[in-house]
Amino acid sequence: MLWKNTPARFGSISIIIHWMVALAVYGLFALGLWMVGLGYYDTWYHRAPELHKSIGILIFAAMVFRLAWRFISPPPKSLDSYSAKTRIGAWLAHVLLFVGLFGILISGYLISTAEGQAVSVFGWFEIPATLSGLDQQADIAGTLHLWMAWGIVIVSGFHALAALKHHFIDRDSTLTRMLGR
């Protein structure tokens, strides 16, 4: 099993983190949309946000690792068949995804800690509130969180469509490299 990236393909660590974060982000997006409609007496009214926060903290840790991993094991080089537009588009999409994900995760933390409460991660450990009590902190962070979440879903949707276009129309190895083949 190839753990590190090579100039031609992604290694297992990059592939696992990519798909794990993608699935978790889409799961949290669906959970977030569902939980804001819950009534106070609903069984999940308190459980859903706790689950959302815990998974969000774990995604943050995975994203910090993923960012460090890009320096330890750089991603494969772009295919020679890519045009300049494709290279710029791919770079821009990746920057938007990384910045957007960190923005969502940080804004979620600011929502959760606005009143000075730590964030419990599945009851295993707590992340203390380091910045709280700012004027309208939860409201501003909440608005940013929502819009960035929608932005990530849209950008990642285009990212997936581009991968499918490369696979089925261009017939290159863009998608198969991230599938471990």
Image (cartoon, grey):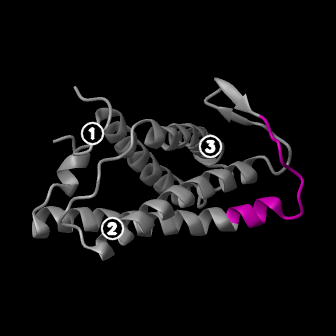
Residue 23 in the image: state x and y as whole percent. 39, 47
Numbered label attached to residue 87? 2
How far apart, in angstroms, are the residues tagged by discs 3 and 2?
A: 35 Å
Numbered label attached to residue 53? 3
> Is the residue under label 2 in contact with that under label 1 (CB below 8 Å)?
no
Label disc, if present, on residue 6 of the rendered structure: 1
Question: Which residue is located at x 47 percent, y 41 percent?
Answer: 71
Mark 3 and mark 1 in contact? Answer it, CB < 8 Å: no
Query: How far from the left and from the top, in percent, is residue 28?
Result: 50, 50
Q: Which residues are magenta?
A: 128-142
Q: CA distance from mark 1 to mark 2?
A: 19 Å
Q: Secondary structure at mark 2?
A: helix
Nearer-N-terminus badge (3/1): 1
- Whether residue 178 is visible here, answered yes or no, is yes
Q: Nearer the viewer, residue 51 or 98?
A: 98
Q: Nearer the viewer, residue 159 or 82?
A: 82
Left or right: 42, with 62 as reference point: right
The amino acid type of the residue labelled 1 equals Thr
Residue furthest bottom in the image: 85
Neighbour tally class for label 1: few under 14, some 14-19, many 20 plus, Cα within 10 Å: some
Residue 42 lies in the magenta stretch: no
- Crowding at dot 3, Cα within 10 Å, few <14 / some 14-19 / many 20+, comes out as many
Element carrying mark 3:
helix
- State the image coordinates of residue 63 (x, y, percent, origin top left): 52, 43
Give the position of the N terminus as an image quadrant. Answer: top left
- Residue 3 occupies quadrant: top left
Q: Residue at x 43, y 60 (%)?
A: 94
Residue 129 on image: x %, y %: 81, 41
Res 35 → quadrant:
bottom right
